[in-house]
Image (cartoon, grey):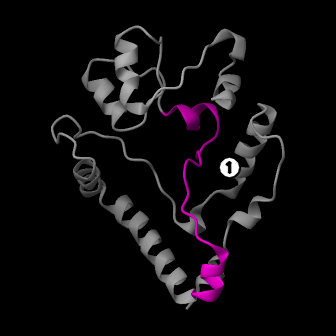
Amino acid sequence: MPVLIKNIGLKESEIKLIELSNSSLIQALLDNQVDAIMVLEPERTAALNQGMTVVVEPVLPKYIITPFPGVAYVIMRDLITKQHRIAYKLKILLDGSVAFVDANIEDSRAMFINFYNLDKEIYSNTYLPQFQKMVEINKGSIVSLMTKMSEAGVLTTSFDIQKLFAEPGQFKQ
């Protein structure tokens, strides 16, 4: 949030952040406990279905960096060296899952709705995040995010992000 606040031109003294669980954000807005909320799915769709208005979407890629590196899957380096076959199969499975989601948006949305046991009518237009295969990851955006986090005082030290990434060649059969 400090990076977002800085990039939209606000000063931390101009805004009061309140930490709430995702499930309580909408009610806090309805009860006038807060003036605005930043929500993820499935609360984003629930807010829209309750007549709320999206002010900015997507917030993080628009005001911080695009593509925004939200999450990652991580494995131990020892798995690659000591159990190469398992690491290879895991990479193939994860990259295949990304390819499936990209090629089957509606099926993927249905799986998301079923997994979270959501009402199919209410959540039929749920936003699905974008995922990338290992070779597609934009390392420059991660470096840029790290720089912005340092400038906002969130990170106090920097580190070599290359250590976070396995080389695709390490997964060859």
Q: Nearer the viewer, residue 35 or 172?
A: 35
In the rendered structure, does residue 74 fall within the stretch colored magenta? yes
Q: Residue extending furthest right? A: 157
Identified at 77% across, 40% down, the residue is: 155
Identify whether 78 is placed above or below 60.
Answer: below
Q: Position of residue 100 (x, y in %)?
A: 35, 65
10 Å neighbourhood of mark 1: few (<14), some, or many (≥20)?
some
Identified at 45% across, 69% down, the residue is: 94
Identify whether 107 is placed above or below 19.
Answer: below
Q: Nearer the viewer, residue 65 or 91?
A: 91
Q: Position of residue 8 (x, y in %)?
A: 65, 22
47 on left or right of 164:
left
Quarter of image, res 66: top right
Q: How many marks?
A: 1
Q: Which residue is mark 1?
A: 141
Identified at 24% across, 38% down, the residue is: 123
Q: Position of residue 135 (x, y in %)?
A: 59, 68
14 on left or right of 51:
right
Identify whether 160 is placed above or below 27.
Answer: below
Identified at 17% across, 42% down, the residue is: 120
In the rendered structure, does residue 82 fall within the stretch colored magenta? yes
Q: Amino acid at mark 1?
A: Ser
Q: Residue extending furthest bottom? A: 173
The residue tagged with tag 1: helix, strand or loop? helix
* Highlighted magenta segment, given as a residue range: 58-83
**Quadrant of the rendering where the C terminus is positioned:** bottom right
Q: Nearer the viewer, residue 133 or 2?
A: 2
**Quadrant of the rendering where the N terminus is positioned:** top right
